[in-house]
Amino acid sequence: MIPVTKPYLPSREKLDQYIDGIYERQWLTNNGQLVRELTRRLEEYLGVENLLLVANGTLALQIAYRALGVSDARPEQHPEAITSPFTFVATASSLKWDGVEPVFADIDPETWCIDPANIKQAITPNTRALVPVHVFGNACNVESIDALAKEHGLSVIYDASHAFGVKYKGESLLTYGDAATLSFHATKLFHTGEGGAIVFKRKDDFERAQKMINFGITGPETIDELGINAKMNELQAALGLCVLDEMDENLAARGSVWREYERALTNRVQFQKKSEDVVYNFAYFPAVFESETQAKKVAAALKESEVLVRRYFYPSLDSVKCLGEYPIQPASRDIASRVLCLPMFGDLDKAEQRKIINIISAELDT
């Protein structure tokens, strides 16, 4: 079976060395040595400041909302945040969970990122924040979004779960907005098994969030902030340090796989239009087919040959009833109905990839 993705597992010998250190120190959590080391190294690697490690990517979003005052409104104020319907459910459900109503603005049908013109139309007196998504690591129109936010006095929290290491105009994409959140789930390009991070623009927001992730505790006998337990532990950090050590090799291998898909499928499927100013991270290989029928047919043929693909992101979130009743977002529903993410990991060998490409090509030719 060829999976759609699989975790990158780094050197076991190096991981064992980190774990030996954990056993020697007997310090498992609460801002241990490895969490501090990983924070420092990630800030250096990504070219950012004010990076806060947390236990998972959903908590990263929730802490960012709380630290920036998005989710601390009284219920009678009906707080809203505008986000994309073409994303993983956590982007919207984390808002709903914290009492903020997600409002969907449709995507650009070529970039698949939220369209600033649609954001502008969705702003109401209850809007407290914009939560755009750098879909598949592609940069949103950050200049237009940040200008809209400034004009209307709104916070911007970028869901950058797919954008680890992505550069825009020579700088980290994570420097845009009031905050950008990352997921370090096992299937991500960089991972800690489970985990996440928030990059804050301002140090005071970072310091407030730093208190929040440890129950608001600031000393042995002081609690200064309403908080929660969102800390990353030392075992997660140890895995992350090992993965980071091997990031260059992993990126090179993934890039080779990505470029072979691109070469073989150009002019046969629709690719995501990326900004010329983006340096991509090869995190995913999404392909959009001519119709939903064709996409399902290709997926079935691949599954019959023990190759798994994923309709990612499907369904479009404006159709998910547990989130609420929303106006139809046609571009999101269209792309969501026709997209497949193909198997994408560094050790996908050439024969396996050729098998995948041949099956897709055969189905497209029938």
Image: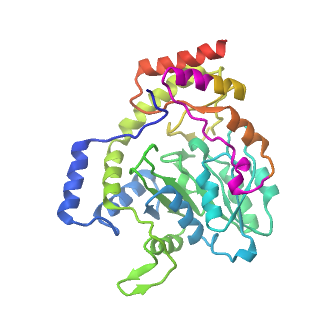
Residue 192 locus on image (x, y percent):
38, 51
Closer-to-camera residue (177/216): 216
- Which span of residues is magenta-colored? 298-326
Residue 40 appears left or right of 327: left
> In the picture provided, is 28 more to the left or to the right than 198?
left
Point out residue 294 in the picture as x, y percentages from the top left corner: 68, 23
Residue 61, by quadrant, is bottom right
Identify the image quadrant of residue 23: bottom left
**In this rendering, is residue 12 above or below 146?**
above
- Residue drawn 51% across and 21% down? 356
Give the side of residue 305 with respect to residue 41, left or right. Answer: right
Residue farthest to the bottom, as pictured: 221
The image quadrant where one finds the C terminus is top right
Q: Is residue 58 magenta?
A: no
Q: For residue 301, which quarter of the picture?
A: top right
Horizontal and vertical percent position of residue 69:
62, 73
Query: Which residue is located at x 53 percent, y 46 percent?
Result: 162
Counting from the top left corner in percent of width and height, residue 354 is at: 48, 17
Residue appearing at x 70%, y 35% in the figure: 337
Whether residue 138 appears in this view of the structure is: no
Q: Is residue 207 above or below residue 279?
A: below
Q: Which quadrant: the N terminus?
A: top left
Q: What scheme was used to colour the molecule?
A: rainbow
Residue 201 position (above or below residue 317) = below
Please name whichever residue, 1 or 134, is drawn nearer the observer in this view of the structure.
Answer: 1
